[in-house]
Amino acid sequence: ERAAIQAILPAQEQKRLKDSADARKKEVHATLAKMTGRRLSVDDQDLVKRIQFFVEQSDQAERRRDMSQADVFAQRAQEPARGWQSGK
């Protein structure tokens, strides 16, 4: 398998992206925790799975030290979580 080509970012930018991804994921986890124990519709269950998928993708990108992708995936998890929270 070929390694993905990653842009080389300065350490300060990598830290900013990591901090951003971490903050987004913290917000997502807090939203998901509020929903724990509630009866969820099938659509909401699917949304939870999609949000969790993006969080896991963010974690994997972070383990690869690809902070740009980690932040992008965290944002993809955060957006529906925010929309879901505001709709509940």
Image (cartoon, rainbow, N blue to C red):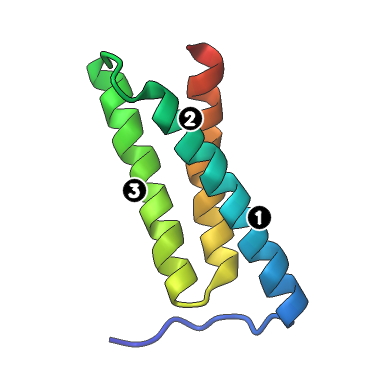
Q: How many marks?
A: 3
Within-10-Å neighbours for mark 1: few <14, some 14–19, many 20+? some
Name the residue tied to disc 3: 53
Looking at the image, is mark 3 or mark 2 earlier in the sequence? 2
- Give the mark, 2 or 1, whose residue is nearer the N terminus: 1
List x then y, in percent, for residue 6: 55, 81
Amino acid residing under circle 1: Ser
Where is residue 7 shown, x and y percent of the image? 62, 81
Callout 2 amino acid:
Thr
Mark 3–mark 2 contact, CB under 8 Å? Answer: no
**Cα distance in 3D space between marks 2 and 1:** 17 Å
Q: Position of residue 44 (x, y in %)?
A: 32, 22
Element on which disc 2 rests: helix
Foreground pick, 77 / 24: 24
The quarter of the displayed image where residue 13 is located:
bottom right
Q: Earlier in the sequence, mark 3 or mark 1?
A: 1
Element under label 1? helix
Which disc, if any, is residue 31? 2
Q: CA distance from mark 3 to mark 1?
A: 18 Å
Question: SS for tag 3?
Answer: helix
Tag 2 and tag 1, C-beta contact below 8 Å:
no
Q: Which mark is residue 20?
A: 1
Image quadrant in which you'd find residue 9 = bottom right
The reply to whether the C-beta atoms of the residues labelled 3 and 1 are less than 8 Å apart is no
Point out residue 21 in the picture as x, y percentages from the top left corner.
Answer: 59, 55
Distance from the alpha carbon under mark 3 to that under mark 2 = 15 Å
**Image quadrant occupied by the N terminus:** bottom left
Q: Left or right? Give the position of 41 relative to 60.
A: left
The vertical placement of 29 against 8, above or below, is above
* Residue 83 higher or lower than 29, as above or below: above
Which residue type carries mark 3? Phe
**Identity of the residue drawn at 65% across and 84% down:** 8
